[in-house]
Amino acid sequence: MHEIYKDKGTYNFFCLLPQIIYSVLISSIIDIIIKNSVLSQRNILEIKHEKNEYNLKHKIIIVIKCLIIKFVCFYIITFLLLILFWYYISCFSIVYKNTQKHLFINSLIGLLISFIYPFIFCLLPGILRIPSLKWPGKFLYKISMIIQIL
């Protein structure tokens, strides 16, 4: 707020760039946490690798109950957070009317970065794996695996 006041309302991209980067990093960390806690791939693989038929039926029931609980909790928490964020942004925009333009521009820049970020980190491992197949060393392959985890 103070920087916007000092700049007399003009948009200073380089002053706000660290805040945009912080918000993208925080949202990426939250995204990783949500993916690890809500995705059901691990549960499905447990069923797939089960050999005993009695344990398989029992495990299917347990996994279905677990998935239902995960999905219900996910949608409830997501809905509550959306309401909370909507309320916060509405109050912020009402109190600080002259910063709505800055908030909108920062949101668009953050959205563009969040669109470009996965594209780079999905394309880069594929590009590194092509030369790793041609060269005998596994260095490029390991780098591509590390980038894929990110």
Image (tube, helix red, strand yellow):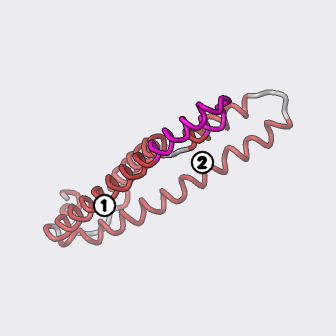
Of marks 2 and 1, which one's residue comes earlier in the chain? 1
| Viewer-proximal residue among 69 and 112 | 69
Task: Residue lying at the far front in this picture: please name it.
Answer: 54
Residue at the spot of label 2? 121
| Viewer-proximal residue among 53 and 68 | 53
Residue 65 is labelled as none
Residue beneath the point at 80% across and 27% down? 137
Which amino acid is tagged 1?
Answer: Leu
Q: CA distance from mark 2 to mark 1?
A: 27 Å
Q: Which residues are magenta?
A: 45-67
Residue beneath the point at 65% across and 29% down? 52
Residue 9, picture quadrant: bottom left
Residue at the spot of label 1? 82
Mark 1 neighbour class, 10 Å CA radius: few under 14, some 14 to 19, many 20 or more: few
Classify mark 2: helix, strand or loop.
Answer: helix
Which amino acid is tagged 2?
Answer: Phe
Quadrant of the rendering where the N terminus is positioned: bottom left
Residue 141: x and y in percent read: 72, 34
| Viewer-proximal residue among 58 and 20 | 58
Residue 1 lies, with reference to residue 54, above or below; the image says below
Classify mark 1: helix, strand or loop.
Answer: helix
Residue 132: x and y in percent read: 79, 36
Membership of 72 in magenta stretch: no
Quadrant of the rendering where the C terminus is positioned: top right
Residue 136: x and y in percent read: 84, 28
| Viewer-proximal residue among 99 and 95 | 95
Residue 31 lies, with reference to residue 42, above or below; the image says below
Residue beneath the point at 42% across and 51% down? 71
